[in-house]
Image: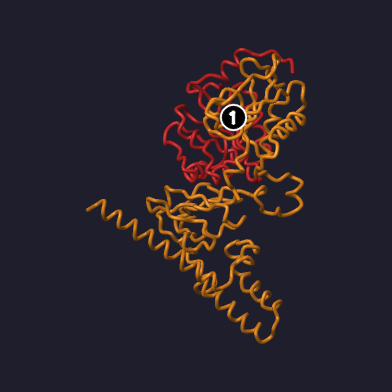
Chain colours: A orange, B red
Amino acid sequence: MIAEALLPPRVVVYEGAGAIPLPATDRASIFASLLDRGYAVTRAGAAAADLQAGGALIVIGCFPDGPPVVSDPSGRCDVTIRDVTGLSVGETVAAVEEARGERRMNRPPEASAVANGPIANTAETWKPWFPVIDTARCTNCMQCLSFCLFDVYGVATDHTLRVENPANCKVNCPACSRVCPEVAIMFPKYHAGPIDGGPVAESDVHREKMKVDISALLGGDIYAKLRERSADAKTRFSKERSADQALSERRRCLTKLADAAQIPREVLDALPSPEEIQRRVEAAAARASAAKEAAGAADAGGTA
Amino acid sequence: MTEPHPQAETAAMLADDAARILYCRCAYAQVVPAAVKDAVLEGLAAAGRGFEMVPDLCEMAARRDPHLAELARGDRPLRIFACWPRAVQGLFALADAPLPKQGVEILNMRTDTAEAVLAGGLATPDGARS
C-alpha cells in the first residue's frame, strides 16, 4: 500500500542564479497547491541534497536564458526541468503533473471528496493513520503487540517494540492506544490529546491504567467474549438459519465495545472469524512473550 | 514574471549556515487549522530563504522515506514546522531516522498562532527575525 514505487516526485522550485524568482503573489499558492496534491517541494538551494536522495526530481523555474542542463551522474535521480515563465498557478501545477507522467503516487483527498464521506482506502488514496511510539514512555511491555489483530506491531532487532506494518492499521481506530498503560502510543491524526501526541498529564496516566484491562469493558476477556458471542450466534444460526440475525447479534454485542473504546464500527465488522482471531491472538502473544524473554536474556547477559 | 532578482534574497536562500527549515502541510487530515498552516506557508515563502516542504510527515514516515534520514542527520540546525513535538519525534524514529537531541526545534502549528510559530521559527540566534 505504501510501497517505494509510490514515492512521490520531489519538486524543486529553483529561484537561484540564472533564474528569475516566481511572482511573490503566486509563490505560496504554488507551494500549497503542489503540497495538497502530494508532492514534496524544495525551494531553491538544496538541489544537490535532493539528488543524493534519489528518485524523481522535477525542477521548475523561470529561466530567461532557457532551462539549465541538470543531470545526476550517479543515475539515481530522474531529473525533469520545466520552464514556468509566464504561467499562472494552475498552469504551473499542470506543468508539474504533466512532467510526472504516469508515475503513481499516494495523494491527499480533495476537500470536496472529504465532504462526501469516507474515501476508499487504496494504494493511491491511503490516509496515513497508524500508531507512533513515544520511545521515552514505552516500556516494551508488548501489550499493544498482543492486542493488535492486524500485525501492525513487530519487534526490532534490539527486542524493542516497533511499528512494522503501518499500512495494516485500520483508519481512525485508536484502540491499541487505549491498552497502553504508559500512554506511549500516539495517533498524530487523532482529534484530541494525549493520543494526538499532546502533553501527557498525570491524570491521563491514571485514566489509562484504570482502563488498561480493556476486556473489563465486556466483563471478561475480550476475545473470549467475542468467541462466546460468535458461538452463540452460530448455534442460533444453525437452528434458525438466519445469517441476518447472526450479523445483527454480532453488531449488538460489539456496540458496547465500539462505544467504550471509540473503535470504528467498520473495524469491528471487519474482524476475522473467531478461529482466526484466536490464531492471531496466540501468534501475537507468542511474539510478545519471545520478545520480552529475549530482552530479558540480553539484559542478563549485559549485566553478567 | 519580470520581478527583479533581489541579490539579498538569493544570498540568504543559498546560505549554508542558516538553520534548515522543514514545513509539514498535514495534507491528509484536517487536524492542523488551515488558516494557520496557510499563513505560516505564506510567511515562509516571503522570508526569502530556501526551505523544504512535505505534504505529510506521517505519510513519509510510514514509507520510511530516505529524505527524512537526510534531514535528521544534517549538520545544520533544523526547524520543523509541524505539530506536537512528541509526535514529530516519534515519526522520525519510526522512519529509522531519529532526530538528534540537539539542534532541532519543533514548532507546533496545531496549537500556536501563525505569528507565534513564524516568530519562533524564523528567529536568528541573536533573536532577530531572518
The one of A117 and A3 positioned closer to us in this rendering:
A3
Q: Chain of mark 1?
A: B
Q: Quadrant of residue A102?
A: top right
Q: Which is nearer the eye, B117 or A290?
A: A290
Where residue A180 sits: x, y (%)?
47, 58
Residue at 58% from the left image edge and 80% from the top image edge: A231
Residue drawn at the location 60% of the way across and 81% of the way down: A232
Which residue is label 1 attached to? Answer: B118
Q: Is residue A21 above or below residue A251?
A: above
Q: Nearer the viewer, residue B111 or A174?
A: A174
Vertical order, A73 against B24 (above or below): above
Residue B83 x %, y %: 56, 41
Name the residue: 52% across, 43% down: B64
Left or right side of B126 for A66? right
Instruction: Between residue A69 and residue B46, name the one nearer to us.
Output: A69
Q: Residues within 10 Å of mark 1 (few under 14, many from 20)?
A: many
